[in-house]
Image (cartoon, coloured by chain):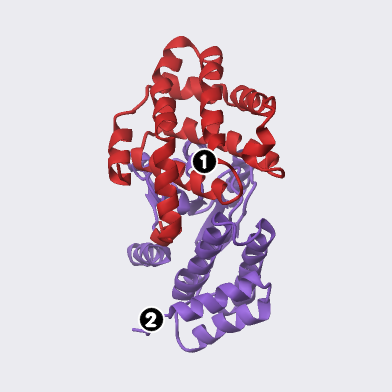
Chain colours: A purple, B red
Amino acid sequence: MHPPITQEVTNEFMQSLLSGDRREGARIIQDLLFSGVPVQRAYEEVIKKALYHVGELWEHNQITVAEEHLATSVSEAIMNELFPALVSRARTNRKVLLGCVENELHQVGVKMVADVFEMKGWDTFFLGTGIPVHEMIRYAKSLRPDLFALSISIYFHLPVLEAMIGQIRQEFPETNILVGGQGFRHGGREVLQNLPGVLLIDDLYSLEQYIDGLAETG
Amino acid sequence: MDKKTLIESATRLGPFSPTTATGYADKSDRLIARINEALLSRADTKSIVGDINLAMMKDNHANHVRFIASILKHFDAEVLTETVLWVFRAYRNRGFASTYWAAQLSAWFPILREELPREIYEEVRPLYEWMQVNIPLFEKLSHEQSENGESPYQNGH
């Protein structure tokens, strides 16, 4: 068990994001990983927490939209730097197609999900934001993924998510669909309960358990 | 009244019929256009939303309609209450006056009555009345949350 990541580390990381200091932010994350902290914990307890706090600062008008966007883009850049080191050499030959619900603007969370799949040897196909569902499905028909993973950060996109799942289901009736994101912070989980093959993932730790479970069951 | 009581009062507003959810969502573009028109025609708009916030006000109207459409489809009293509190807090911190909420919610009633079929209007009216009569409480609770540093982000998802 690794020691808890202190609030001080998360705060320092957040300051590096807000000042646009990518090198300092990358150093903080690299130091954590070098000390043995798993990537999932660095993502959950440092990057995610810092970005949530950035959201709070925007909410309280303590930072501008530009600073909020800067924090997000620096976070993504740091994650991109980590990518070569976290990819597993042992490949499973399984494919996951990931994307955000149509109209979403936030992709950091689902990008973290993609990285966890890569760590577990899956091939990831990350479509990001702004992908129309029919284009995702068209691409999926050629890819034939083993799994879909969709992200929703805003509650009022829930009907869009439902419609998207319905359309995917028509073409891929047997393929499981993982769903997650801040959109479920206060509710909406019951909407997914009656949808067969759709699973809500709360965090990266649950995701890891799910992927490991798939590996065990073959 | 505290937040718990407010959420309890909200539970009595729904669920809503599928016809109402669909009927409201189908009118989304028209509703957004009408509420923008109504608020922009007021002489005091800039004073109640702030000089540079007209675009943000229009964003809020579009988000309002999308959010209400979601709530009508999947009613959830906690999501409703927490989201309204978040909106009050975030927009106040960006210079929106409390009178904006009264102006906006008052403007909704004639628009909804004219745009929606009567039975749909009658079903959504209590939801808008709930938001309208609770403006002072939303103001108070969202202030308290700001002062206590309480935020939905801290709860994770």
The vertical placement of B30 against B75, above or below, is: above
Residue visible at 67% across and 73% down in the picture: A19
The vertical placement of A57 against B41, above or below, is: below
Q: Position of residue A192 (x, y in %)?
A: 37, 42
Residue visible at 41% across and 54% down in the picture: B145
| Mark 1 lies on residue | A157
Name the side, left or right, on which A46 lies relative to B156.
right
Q: Position of residue A105 (x, y in %)?
A: 61, 50
Q: Nearer the viewer, residue A76 or A58?
A: A58
Q: Is residue A92 visible?
A: no
Q: Which mark is residue A4?
A: 2
Amino acid found under the numbered disc labelled 1: His
Q: Nearer the viewer, residue B131 or B137?
A: B137
Tell me if mark 1 has few (under 14), some (14-19) or many (20+) residues whose alpha carbon lies within 10 angstroms of its own. some
Amino acid found under the numbered disc labelled 2: Pro
Dot 1 or dot 2: first in sequence order is: 2
Estimate the spatial distance between the alpha carbons at disc 1 and disc 2, rounded to whole Å. 35 Å
